[in-house]
Image (tube, rainbow, N blue to C red):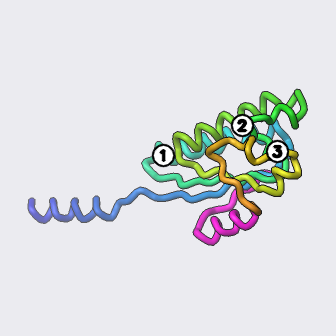
Amino acid sequence: MKHTLLLLLALLGTIQAQEYKAVFDCSSDDARYISGRMMLVEKTIEMIEKRGDKATVAITLHGGCVPMASRAFEEIIYDEDMPYIQNAQNVITRLAEKKGVEIVACAMSLDANAIEQKEVLPFVHISKNSFIDTIAYQNRGYAVMTFK
């Protein structure tokens, strides 16, 4: 009995939750696609956690993806895109606040989209160049998932 208990404890000690590390790199300018992809990121994190594993996730925004990082996105996007960008912004807000997802916006893309840094959501980190951040995440073992 004692040996069985020790064997069981040894086996339990070797079973550990797996960590999934991913950086989702978004550059698309298709608002509907962006919205769907952000919801998929959220669902993926939920599925990983439901398995008992850990999801460590970052999202880098550049190009057409940066409007969702702005408090005033309605000033720079087409009316028909507003519900999709609003949904994507709601998702990244939940992910940042409830799941600890790091959201990084490229300063060059903010400038290109006429978004002032003071308009960026408070949980969004502004990077001089989000490509550098994406490379750094990859160098730290994050899988790179792209939205183009």
Magenta span: 131-148
Of circles 1 and 2, the one toward us is 2
Tag 1 or tag 3, which sits nearer the N-term? 1
Other residues around mark 2 within 10 Å, as few (<14) / some (14–19) / many (≥20): many
Residue 42 sits in which quadrant? top right
Label disc, if present, on residue 88 of the rendered structure: 2
Q: Secondary structure at mark 1?
A: helix
The label shown at residue 1 is none
In the rendered image, residue 99, in percent from the top left (x then y), is placed at 53, 44
User: Which residue is pictured at 88% across the width and 51% down the height?
Assistant: 112
Nearer-the-camera pick, 110 or 132: 110
Q: Nearer the viewer, mark 3 or mark 2?
A: 3
Note whether 33 is above or below 107 in the view shown: above
Q: Which residue is mark 3?
A: 115
Name the kind of residue labelled 2 in the image: Ala
**Is residue 138 within the magenta segment?**
yes
**Quadrant position of residue 80:** top right
The reply to whether callout 1 and callout 2 are in contact (CB within 8 Å) is no
Dot 1, how many residues are within 10 Å of its Cα: few (below 14), some (14-19), or many (20+)?
some
Report the residue at 13% width, 65% height from top: 3
Front position among marks 3 and 1: 3
Q: Residue at x 29, y 62 (%)?
A: 13
Among numbered discs 3 and 2, the one appearing first in the sequence: 2
Q: CA distance from mark 1 to mark 2?
A: 21 Å
Three-letter amino acid code of the residue under disc 1: Glu
Q: Which residue is mark 1?
A: 49
Q: CA distance from mark 3 to mark 1?
A: 34 Å
Q: Residue furthest bottom?
A: 139
Camera-side residue: 147 or 51?
147
